């Protein structure tokens, strides 16, 4: 399998991990050699309810039996997408009224950027240093990492950057600004949590100058930080909320959500200002609905904070300099990038799945399924501590 994987499938790096997958269940991924790998990554924060959660599988099967794709997005009334958008709205601040479903996180960000420009009639976009919002041209333009951008220029113009958590830079937001785009908790940068009412100050400035605030909750959303959405911790609601990853517990999806008057500008002048064939796909919407129902009907979200505590109490070691993040979105900051690399690679050999972050090279990601048990946490932490003892 690995040979054909390398031969026929396009690669993102020269040395992919290349684990050969047989199946996955709960917090374990099984390889074709019969090893069970404890998953501390959840497909990079995507499998919020673990692998193949029975409620999600049942919803997918049921919907696949009824109908799958029947029409492009937005023309026909299809109950999975409608019920989902309604349940989301009931669990969001009052200004976030309508949901536009798309196929991935980055596509949701593209839609949000277009919406902000269309609604405000302004072009300037402000994003943060070390932000990650995806890899299509618009999302890539938001990134402030020349090495990754240079080969793909020219990108979209009129994007400026501010430093996350730096109050002085907030004054760069002006009447020219269409939108400010921030991850509620910065992911690739090293799981950086907003401090000192930073998001509230950004919110106030946006209100003052008439700019829209877009919050990217693609990674922290859907319970991962102990609230349904991370912005609930920070006394700040966005004008446009961008979601993805964990929303369908492993199915490909994204969405952007805004107030009715804002969102309506995408359906008129031009008509169909954003279109997608598969957005709102009924099978994916059914998986999203089942995921949200489980999150709302159980104590998984609240337990996230107890599990964070257990990780923080257990993972004390001189080689771990800091643990950043919130809930089950945690980054171990090691002494050096080399130690981070060794930890991830040696853990793989011991059947524990860990992963890196995009920009912070000293970091090791811990973002397990929210369904992980305390025993599984302790088991995985033991492996980490043993490896660090040996380094
Ligand atoms: C914060 C954030 N925004 C956007 C994206 C892009 O999402 P996708 O890979 O589904 O396009 C990611 C993916 O890692 C992300 O973490």
Image: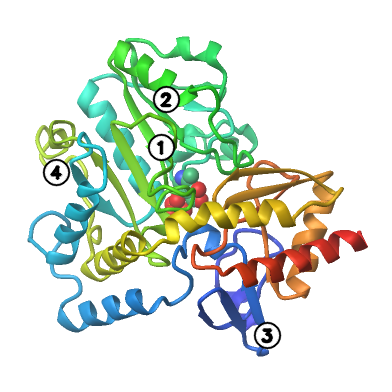
Which percent across, then down, holds residue 312? 68, 51
Discs 1, 3 touching: Cβ within 8 Å: no
The local secondary structure at tag 4 comes to loop
Alpha-carbon neighbours of circle 4 within 10 Å: few (<14), some, or many (≥20)?
few
Callout 3: CB less than 8 Å from ligand 1: no
Residue sitting at 82 percent across and 59 percent down? 342
Of residues 68 and 182, the one drawn nearer to the viewer in this rendering: 182
Distance CA(mark 1)–CA(mark 3): 39 Å
Q: Is residue 390 visible?
A: yes
Q: Mark 1 or mark 4, which has the lower sequence index?
A: 1
Alpha-carbon neighbours of circle 2 within 10 Å: few (<14), some, or many (≥20)?
few
Which residue is label 2 attached to? 157
Which residue is label 1 attached to? 231
Callout 4: CB less than 8 Å from ligand 1: no
Q: Mark 4 or mark 3, which has the lower sequence index?
A: 3
Q: Mark 3 or mark 2, which has the lower sequence index?
A: 3
Quarter of image, res 236: top left
Q: Mark 4 or mark 2, which has the lower sequence index?
A: 2
Q: Which mark is residue 272?
A: 4
Distance CA(mark 3)–CA(mark 2): 49 Å
């Amino acid at each position: 399998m690995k040979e054909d994987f390398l031969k026929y499938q396009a690669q993102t790096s020269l040395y992919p991990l290349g684990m050969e997958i047989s199946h996955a269940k709960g917090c374990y991924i099984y390889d074709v050699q019969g090893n069970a790998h404890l998953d501390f990554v959840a497909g990079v924060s995507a499998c919020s309810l673990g692998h193949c959660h029975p409620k999600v599988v049942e919803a997918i099967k049921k919907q696949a039996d009824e109908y799958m794709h029947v029409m492009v997005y937005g023309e026909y009334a299809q109950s999975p997408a409608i019920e989902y958008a309604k349940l989301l709205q009931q669990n969001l601040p009052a200004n976030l009224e309508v949901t536009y479903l798309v196929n991935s996180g980055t596509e949701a960000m593209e839609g949000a950027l277009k919406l902000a420009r269309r609604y405000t009639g302004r072009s300037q976009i402000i994003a943060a240093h070390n932000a990650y919002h995806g890899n299509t041209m618009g999302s890539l333009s938001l990134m402030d990492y020349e090495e990754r951008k240079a080969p793909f220029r020219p990108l979209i113009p009129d994007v400026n950057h501010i430093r996350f958590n730096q109050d002085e830079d907030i004054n760069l937001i002006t009447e020219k600004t269409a939108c400010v785009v921030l991850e509620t908790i910065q992911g690739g940068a090293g799981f950086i949590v907003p401090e000192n009412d930073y998001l509230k100050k950004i919110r106030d400035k946006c209100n003052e100058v008439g700019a829209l605030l877009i919050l990217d909750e693609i990674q922290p959303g859907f319970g991962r930080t102990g609230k349904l959405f991370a912005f609930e911790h920070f006394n700040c609601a966005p004008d446009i909320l961008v979601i993805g990853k964990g929303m369908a517990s492993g199915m490909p999806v994204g969405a952007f959500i805004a107030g009715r008057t804002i969102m309506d500008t995408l359906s008129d002048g031009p008509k169909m200002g954003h279109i997608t064939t598969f957005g709102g796909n009924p099978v994916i919407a059914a998986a999203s609905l089942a995921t949200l129902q489980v999150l709302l009907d159980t104590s998984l979200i609240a337990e996230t904070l107890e599990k964070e505590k257990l990780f923080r109490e257990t993972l004390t070691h001189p080689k771990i300099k800091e643990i950043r993040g919130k809930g089950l979105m945690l980054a171990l900051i090691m002494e050096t990038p080399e130690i981070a690399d060794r930890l991830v690679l040696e853990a793989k050999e011991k059947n524990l799945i860990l992963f890196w972050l995009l920009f912070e090279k000293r970091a090791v990601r811990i973002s397990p399924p929210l369904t992980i048990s305390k025993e599984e946490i302790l088991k995985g932490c033991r492996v980490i501590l043993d490896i660090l003892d040996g380094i």
